[in-house]
Every structure is written in structure tokens, then in C-alpha cells.
Amino acid sequence: MKYLHTMIRVSDPEATVAFFELLGLKEVHRKDSEKGRFTLIFMAAPGDEKAQIELTHNWDPEDYGSARNFGHIAYRVDDIYATCRRLMDGGVTINRPPRDGHMAFVRTPDNISIEILQEGHLPPQEPWISMPNIGEW
């Protein structure tokens, strides 16, 4: 058995691709299905192309709601502070800042939780130490 990908439904593929590009992922494959009226976009971290996220965009409008039963997607990064700064500079809200130098949470444009984990630990740094949690993560 082999892990292939995690699929999430997205309402705005351009905004979601931009979010994951800010996170550091790259698009590795895209498929449009006229008959099925959907687009599949596969993204992965450079050098880890076998662990993919599938963004599924159904062309007909759907309300996916804000159910929390999915949980989250997690990515390990080399520098959590630089990753969170890049995301903030790109307009992403840091819902749970990396105060401990180890873990942070953000959300995609469709409100899916993304956990960012530091490889090892970094010492706590400002402005992250005093930054409050924003909403649920």
C-alpha cells in the first residue's frame, strides 16, 4: 500500500493554488473534465512530488459549508518563521502563531486548516511570541 494524495474541494481554484504556492508547493498536474464538469489540480512540495494534495473544483457552484470533520493537512518546513512571514506578506492570516518555534496553523481560502511544523525546534521569536491566536485552528 502507498499513500497517494489528500483531496479537498475548493470553490476558487486560483486563490487556493496561490495559497499553496505561498506555502511552497508547486502544481505538478492538472486535469479538466468537460464531461464531469470539474478540474483536478495536483500540488506537491518540490522534491516530495509523490506526496500530493488534490484540489478538486466542481464547476457548478456548491456550498461546502465549514464542517470541521476533515481535520487538517500538515507540512514540515525548514524555517517556520520565514514560512509564516511569507504567508502573512501574501495576505494569509496566521490563526495559531508559531510562538513555540515549532507549530502554526493557517487556513486555505476554503477554510481548511493547515498545520505547519518546524523541522526540529527554533527558539521563540518576536513578533510571534506576543501574537494572539485568531479564531479556531
Image (cartoon, grey):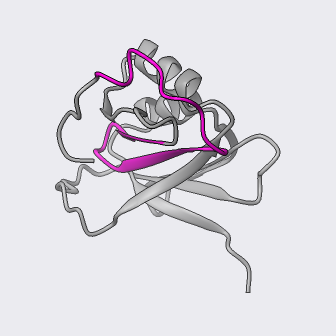
The N terminus, quarter of image: bottom right
In magenta stretch: residue 127:
yes
Residue 108 sits above or below residue 68 on the image:
above
Question: In front: 35, or 121?
Answer: 121
Where is residue 76? Give x, y as percent: 62, 47
**Furthest residue toward bottom:** 1
Q: Residue at x 73, y 79 (%)?
A: 2
Q: Quadrant of residue 122?
A: top right
Where is residue 80? Give x, y as percent: 56, 32
Left or right of 98 in this view: 107: left
In magenta stretch: residue 124:
yes
Predominant secondary structure, magenta span = loop
Where is residue 65? Give x, y as percent: 17, 56
Question: In front: 1, or 42?
Answer: 1
Residues rendered magenta in the picture: 103-130
Q: Residue at x 43, y 34 (%)?
A: 98
Where is residue 101? Give x, y as percent: 51, 35
Q: Is any atom of residue 40 visible in this view?
A: no
**Furthest residue toward right:** 47
Q: Residue at x 47, y 31 (%)?
A: 19
